[in-house]
Image (cartoon, rainbow, N blue to C red):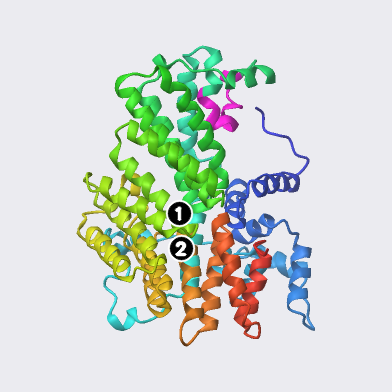
Amino acid sequence: MPKAAYRSRRAELAALRAELTERGTSVARVAAVVRTRFNVNSRVAFRNAVGMTQQQVAEQWNMLWPSDRPLTHKQVSYWEAWPSASGRPPSIEDLNRLARIYQCSAADLLDGDDFTADDAASQAGSEPVGAAVTVAERSLRVQPPDIVGRVDAFITSSGSHLVANEADYQRLVHELIEWAQRMQRRDILQWLSFAAAAAAAAPVLAGLDLDERERTIAAFASPSRVDSQTIDHIEAVLWRCMRQDDALGPTAAMETTLAQRNLVRSLLPAARGAARDRLLSLYANLLRFAGWLCFDLNDYEAANTYFEQARTAAHEAHNTELGALVLCNMSHLATWRGQPRTGIDHALAAGGWAMRTDDDHLKAYAFDVAARAYAMDNQHTAALSSVNSARALVTSSAGSPTGLVYFYNAGQLASTESTCYLYLGQPERGAAVAEQALENIDPAFVRNLALTSLRLGVCRMRAAKPDIAQAAQAIGVAVRLAGHNRSARLIDRLRRGTKELAKWPHIPEVRDVSEQMITYGLAS
């Protein structure tokens, strides 16, 4: 499909921004794409990402910060031209104000080389964040801007990999297209349904009209043509969807996941032997992930339905690890819905299956979901015992988590422990553990960081001696992170947290959070 013709670069920019915004893409990711595609600096990229002219920036500035010497569009132009000879450098205060207008951090607006790879300490590998920090330094609170900066840096560096032009993803699609060229044309679209946008532009589909495309989408691919490499490709795209959800939220991944589920389901009836076992496990994992996405979209009934189907498929495939993980997800869902005893049932079943595997992180995760359920049910001893069991497994396990529980580490466990203390009426301890969690959760897991920062704020609000300014600061971080990851589950909890915070409207930091909720389009 030829590239669309635009009358001007401005028109092309507007079309790109509209397309990405419609997908729910955050400002930071739009800016990353604009910067790469149009070879502009960060200040220009962010201005275009929010769809503003230099004059509009000046007008917004003057409305927010009235002055006897109002800002002009010319000054904005100078800042954008810097460091060229025709430009002028913005001050730190200038960058802070631009960042507020552009919904980003001041650091996002500076360009420069990245020499962190030269720092031997950054290559140390497995040493936990803060492992060498002194006790006195550990007593300092995690500063929320550091958390946002870590995530912003991750999103910026990964932006091109998290949108539709990811190189590895396109390579997978290309390989599938090459494979499809060896098939009958009636089979093609079924195989490429999970990459419809990319496949639509492929030469292999030339000559198929709209009606024929719709008919062939429903056609069954020939199972005899499916080999191990093809299944690898489908699994790789599922992996990409899971990492997309970790950083950006469920919306973008749902359509692809459901299309893959339909594809694999169509292959199962005629599959035999090892290929059937792999396909059935893949089908179960697709169902499980679809359930997780529904959970994150607050569609709890659909989530439960997918999880039940996933459990059945995992057991039919005799995939013990996957069956245990599905039960962990079911426990998490039940507890989140306020059904802790059902959560305990699922967690105990998950632990029983997990103990039959060699995956210590999976075993730990089963204890983790049990701890949440016990704590919500006010079973203090059982909750903290489960936390300690999970900690022992994570501590003794060699290396980082891989496979199905790639997301679970000491930081995620600390986040759960803070949840337990909050349920058990110990918000001070919950706040202390939440701070540790924020140090150790990988910035790729944006939703988890946001929920943990929100919980930190709630713990500070509910402490015997509330620290409302610090609570608002932590919740404000969660708001900014929600600008990256538009999880409905996260946004719902943010609205609850900010409603509770609104009891202190006279505190400036509280008013700032209310403004941020409006700015990011999160207010109810």
Q: Position of residue 388 (x, y in %)?
A: 26, 66
- Asked if residue 193 lies in the magenta stretch, the reply is yes
The quarter of the picture where residue 213 lies is top right
Region in magenta: 191-205
The residue tagged 1 is 334
Confirm whether residue 110 shows in the render. no
> Closer to the camera, 406 or 145?
406
Question: Residue type at mark 1?
Answer: Ala
The N terminus - image quarter: top right
> Closer to the camera, 80 or 296?
296
For image coordinates 45% across by 15% down, the residue present is 222
- Asked if residue 23 lies in the magenta stretch, the reply is no
Q: Which labelled disc corresponds to residue 449?
A: 2
For image coordinates 40% across by 20% down, the residue present is 226
For image coordinates 41% across by 30% down, the residue present is 233
Q: Position of residue 376 (x, y in %)?
A: 42, 65
Please tell me whether residue 307 is drawn above or below residue 461 in the rendered image.
above
Q: Which labelled disc corresponds to residue 46?
A: none
The C terminus - image quarter: bottom right
> Closer to the camera, 246 or 201?
246
Q: CB atoms at circles 1 and 2 under 8 Å apart?
A: no
Does residue 360 appear left or right of residue 317 in this picture?
left
**CA distance separating discs 1 and 2:** 21 Å
Specify the farthest residue to the front: 341
Other residues around mark 2 within 10 Å, as few (<14) / some (14–19) / many (≥20):
many
